[in-house]
Image (cartoon, coloured by chain):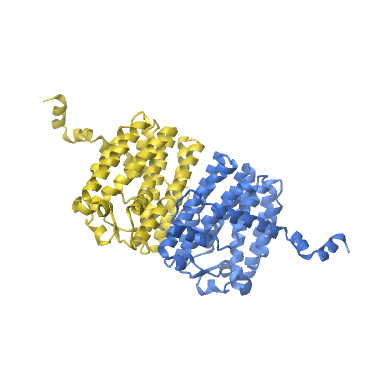
Chain colours: A blue, B yellow
Amino acid sequence: MTPYEQQDSEAGSEAEELRQPLNEYITAVNDLLSAELETTLPAGWQVPERLREAMKYSLDAGGKRLRPLLVLAACEAAGGEREAAVPVAAAIEMVHTYSLIHDDLPAMDNDDYRRGKLTNHKVFGDAAAILAGDALLTHAFYSVVQASRRYGVSADSALSIVEDLAEMAGPRGMVGGQIADMDGEQGLTDLAQLQYIHLHKTGDLIIFSLLAGGRIAGAGQQQLEALREFGTAIGLAFQIQDDILDLVGDEGKLGKKTGSDIKQQKVTYPYFIGLEASREEVRRLTDNARTAVLKGGFADSRRLLEIADYLMKRDH
Amino acid sequence: MTPYEQQDSEAGSEAEELRQPLNEYITAVNDLLSAELETTLPAGWQVPERLREAMKYSLDAGGKRLRPLLVLAACEAAGGEREAAVPVAAAIEMVHTYSLIHDDLPAMDNDDYRRGKLTNHKVFGDAAAILAGDALLTHAFYSVVQASRRYGVSADSALSIVEDLAEMAGPRGMVGGQIADMDGEQGLTDLAQLQYIHLHKTGDLIIFSLLAGGRIAGAGQQQLEALREFGTAIGLAFQIQDDILDLVGDEGKLGKKTGSDIKQQKVTYPYFIGLEASREEVRRLTDNARTAVLKGGFADSRRLLEIADYLMKRDH
């Protein structure tokens, strides 16, 4: 028995955490993020109670918190302080949350539940849900600026983050992807169109998160390019993995029924190229992601590599 | 006959323009703004055609363009270059336009027409209208950043404009005012609540426009405070004048039926304090606005004073 195995058997849960460094990191990120979101509306602001509640309801709904994780991981990989990345991590979670609230509306996907909770408009009504989404999107930009106000991120870097966020969440980015997705549901489409949807509806915010983390740390062009390549690869891998899990995932772990894409006649990667080729594509993209990170020459790229691994192997 | 009168009778329309300097200025602002909005999505961006059209449809719908006018007037009053203010003027028009698109949705005010044109969702459908609004709001922040990229506005100033915009258009500002207005429609309310709604639903974007103009010109704290006071006064005067015009305005000039507030059981200033006292309040606020401008010690405050006058005397 090696010392490590001995420690392992004697202190099971601690050892388990040591073997799951990413889980520990995810917990730390979630704690920082929750505290930030709790106080993101300045104490002196008069905000109508119902709006405050509607914003909070969906921000609290949880989820993978993948985007905040990427902001912090990229910032730390490039040698930045974890805390300085938190306001931008909160911002991207607000943007992600607003997009889900609007997406769930009767006029859009008309979903009653998300992550086992009633959707925002089922609780607060359609009008308040639209406004809560608008408020979260707007406030995200306020939160980005706080990285500069509170942690001394340079005005130049903060302004570039604002510009990136507007580009990647706006008409060229996420919103563009959403309208293409909506139009796609009415009779599709080819693999290029599906790639466009995946890249913009999901990928752009992932790329943004990584670039923003890099910018906060003061990363140079070479590292920013590496982060962009890394994000493009894991963003698409993430989405293909979603498609695969919808087809063959464990309903218990996913928390939703599989096969919903087929029922909704959504085209997916497996639909176009088959299941095995889709799995192969996830592996290939994950390799690309690894290569990109290594090219960046980061001080510590461990977390980014772990995240890429996690995304490939996840089952929910 | 004085030389001036002679010129007047000989070249009627030109002389009329000279007597209406504000009209000329409004035309110049509108031309700059239209050109800016036309090219606000960078040429290299892939934006789905339907989204592009839905954004453009409502941006082209016109209206008073009051907020862009204020951005440019404040910038020039504080000695800044007119052109440098144009991207921010476009941004505030995008924010105003998005708020109208979302406001008109069936889930909100359910309006079929605005300014004599079908509302956005009547033309493009509810889902596309929601997304077009989201896209305009997001892209507004991109446009603010361009003031720095294209006209050398300092990153510090541009970042403060981003922060102001997020504060005054978001949960503490316009969106807060909208939800209070919506809640108010279900059984109101007192004058303080109505003032809260007016200040945030309409006033905050007017204050933002003036502050942003000042920031672009590099105005100091004293001038920024003067612009804030000026904006607070004309913002409320503007809204009270709207209430008055809804009650006693000329339907032909207004382009809509009067008395709609009464039919919709909306509480207004005249409802609380009577018509004559409301008119007096507009005069008082306009005087406050004039006093505020003069305190600012601007190089040229003519336009700002003309705008305050115009808002008081307008009949539509």
Q: Is residue B287 left or right of residue A116?
A: left
Q: Nearer the viewer, residue B302 or A37?
A: A37
The image quarter containing residue A281 is bottom right
Q: Is residue A43 left or right of residue A74?
A: left
Q: Is residue A306 left or right of residue A178?
A: right
Q: Is residue B39 above or below residue B74?
A: below
Q: Nearer the viewer, residue B240 or A301?
A: B240
Tally of numbered tags: 0
Identify the image quadrant of the N terminus of chain A.
Answer: bottom right
Residue at 57% across, 49% down:
A87
Furthest-left residue in this view: B1
Q: Position of residue B270 (x, y in %)?
A: 25, 52
Q: Is residue B184 above or below residue B65?
A: below
Q: Is residue A2 above or below residue A293?
A: below
Furthest-right residue in this view: A1
Residue A274 visible in the snapshot: no
Residue A190 visible in the snapshot: yes
Residue at 41% across, 39% down:
B211
Identify the image quadrant of the C terminus of chain A.
Answer: bottom right
Q: Position of residue B101 (x, y in %)?
A: 37, 56
Residue at 29% across, 46% down:
B238
Q: Position of residue A184 (x, y in %)?
A: 47, 65
Q: Position of residue A67 (x, y in %)?
A: 59, 56
Q: Is residue B315 left or right of residue A295?
A: left
